[in-house]
Amino acid sequence: MSRIGTFPEDQKTTVASINATLADLRDNPSSLDIKAINSLLQQCSELIKTLQHPDSSEHWYCPKAPTEAQEIATFLIRYHAYKDSKGAPDWRESLWKVLKGCPDCVKSYLEARDRSNETYLSQYHESKVKAMNETADQAETEAIIKAVKRSATAQDNTLNSAPTAVVYHALANIRVTQKPEIRDLFEERTPVSSFPDWPEPPPGLLLLLAHSSERIRAWAQKQAETCGPLSRLTSNSPHAIVLSALTRRLQSSDHQSVSSGPSASSSAMPSASIDLSLSLPPPHLWSAYPAILSLAAAEDGLPALKRIAGADIPQFIFSHLNDNGQ
């Protein structure tokens, strides 16, 4: 039996029609007025509720959902801007249920958010898109905290009591990772054991490998060993941006010049916006740096890091092979 979800037969014509409309909207974001957009949102919201899976799980964004459902779910991300408008609360409740149950859906959902910014929302002013993204980040933060608190028990008050996808989400969206409330969760409820079945090491894990708390670093190392290295590192990814921030911190302490030329970092999250206030001070950061780099040991990892950090990373590392971190 296929593990991929399907729409009921009597919905197939509607699915095809809506996906044709979405394809045109991606290419021509201003082709529909706001009234038509709202109508399409409602249709998509109702349609995705009919998606059926062979087990009791729900998937909207990962490969267990058909591509048509993934695209409909991507368009529905627009509901983040609607707050308590008709349809939005029900959509958010369903979204959190999906994300709470599947780390792969979390990863693909965050990628879908980026695609939505570049397609469905591309006709809007940058400030409006930024405001929607901030609303989405805050909604995700609140949902994560709520799920963690609900899962805590008298026997286990650590993050290990929370669903694995929820903890992954807290570290997969690097803007959420840096929220004070999320940082507090990892400090007050530090996991003891690693979580299985994460699709890749999330970017927030790199920050925890450099955390000033030895307890948090120890867990992050366990989790890094469970995850294994990234399969691919690109110079504008959240992982590369965190690596860039940590490398620049070391460069600065070493009085090396840092390139001020063009960077491939995302304008939405430049390396300068990574908060390193809870990270190890530069002399001790060197001891954590090898583990951080090994987690990003994709085939193109070092070239990507070299491009965004403005330094010859291999030479930079070799020049400090005898550094004892004191």
Image: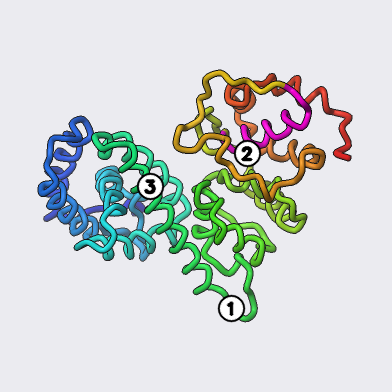
Q: Secondary structure at mark 3?
A: helix
The quadrant in which residue 242 appears is top right
* Residue at the spot 74% in from the left edge and 55% down from the top edge: 213
Is 314 located above or below residue 210 in the figure?
above
In screen coordinates, is 107 left or right of 72?
right
Magenta span: predominant SS is helix
Marks 2 and 1, how far apart in space? 32 Å
**Cα–Cα span, label 2 and label 3:** 28 Å
Which residue was labeled with disc 1? Answer: 153
x and y percentages locating residue 319 in the rendered image: 82, 23
The residues colored magenta run 241-256
User: In this rendering, is residue 88 above or below 153?
Assistant: above
- Where does the C terminus fall, quadrant-wise? top right
Q: Amino acid at mark 3?
A: Asn
The N terminus: image quadrant: bottom left
Q: Position of residue 99 (x, y in %)?
A: 41, 57
Kind of residue at disc 2 = Pro
Q: Which secondary structure, mark 2?
A: loop
* Residue nearer the viewer, 294 or 133: 133
The residue to which callout 3 is attached is 133
Disc 2 target residue: 229
Residue reaching furthest bottom?
A: 154
Amino acid type, residue under disc 1 in the picture: Thr
Q: Residue at x 60, y 63 (%)?
A: 185
